[in-house]
Image: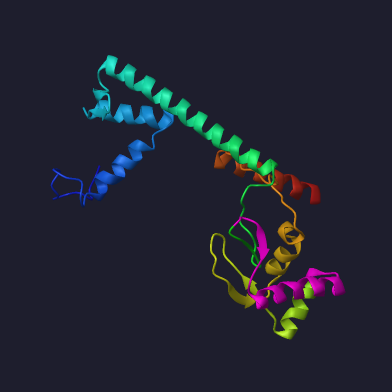
Amino acid sequence: MIDADLGRSGAQTAGRNGFKELVADVGLARNNADWYQLLDLCAITDTLIADADGVYHPADFNDRLVLGLKGTMSEAELHLIRSRLTAGFKHKAAKGALRQGLPVGLDYDEDDKVVLCADEAVREAITTVFRRFDELGSARQVLIRLREDGVLLPRRRNGSKRIFWAQATYPAVHDLLTNQAYAGAFVFGRTRTEKGRPRERDRAFSGSAGAARNGRS
């Protein structure tokens, strides 16, 4: 159901936000689950599907077969593209040439080389954190000393070049002390993302928590 375009002419796409969202959803149906769900809906509602090769009726067996093949080929194409991109990504990382986000105090120059921030106050604040850690040997003690002295720390959000100053916090101090970029090291692949159903993760967590409670009891 598209309610956003009620009362608007279908002769053009200008101002038809609902139609644009529908087109975007159809264009993103690049896996078989989404594609066949779309075909089923179009077949039930007697809706045609068109592409550069022709117009198809999902309720017709022959057209449904062609659309199914197109969906399978599209999914395979997307898989190959993703595989090539991932391989290139890992190849650059293996050479240490992959451009990553830098922490505050470090920037890229015109040749994509990592350089120190041009702001002297930023460099001095970061140096102060490492100097205090050499003296005290504890991130929490560094935090306490910085707050006692009223030292603010430079911060920068991911993807932003703007630097702002904020009161020292333990996560901020810990991030400065443990970020490998300040030591001149290139690190890649320390974390990974896994897909799974939320219910399975919840059951696994609940099971671990229950085992821990039983162990304490």
How many dots with numbers?
0
Residue farthest to the bottom, as pictured: 149
**Does residue 217 appear in this view?**
no
Decide which of 101, 132 is in the foreground and name it.
Answer: 101
Decide which of 128, 136 is in the foreground and name it.
Answer: 128
Residue 58 position in % (x across, y down): 27, 23
Range of magenta residues: 111-139
Q: Is residue 131 magenta?
A: yes
Residue 19 horizontal side relative to residue 27, left or right: left
What residue is rendered at 70% in x and 76% in y? 125
Q: Main secondary structure of the magenta part?
A: helix
Residue 45 position in % (x across, y down): 23, 30
The quadrant in which residue 69 appears is top left
- The answer to whether 145 is drawn above or below residue 177 in the figure is below
Decide which of 13, 211 is in the foreground and name it.
Answer: 13
The quadrant in which residue 179 appears is bottom right
Residue 55 horizontal side relative to residue 171, left or right: left
Q: Is residue 209 magenta?
A: no
State which quarter of the image contains the N terminus.
top left
- The answer to whether 57 is drawn above or below residue 177 in the figure is above
Residue farthest to the top, as pictured: 62
What residue is rendered at 63% in x and 75% in y? 119
What residue is rendered at 69% in x and 46% in y? 96
What residue is rendered at 60% in x and 35% in y? 87
The quadrant in which residue 19 appears is top left
Residue 70 position in % (x across, y down): 37, 23
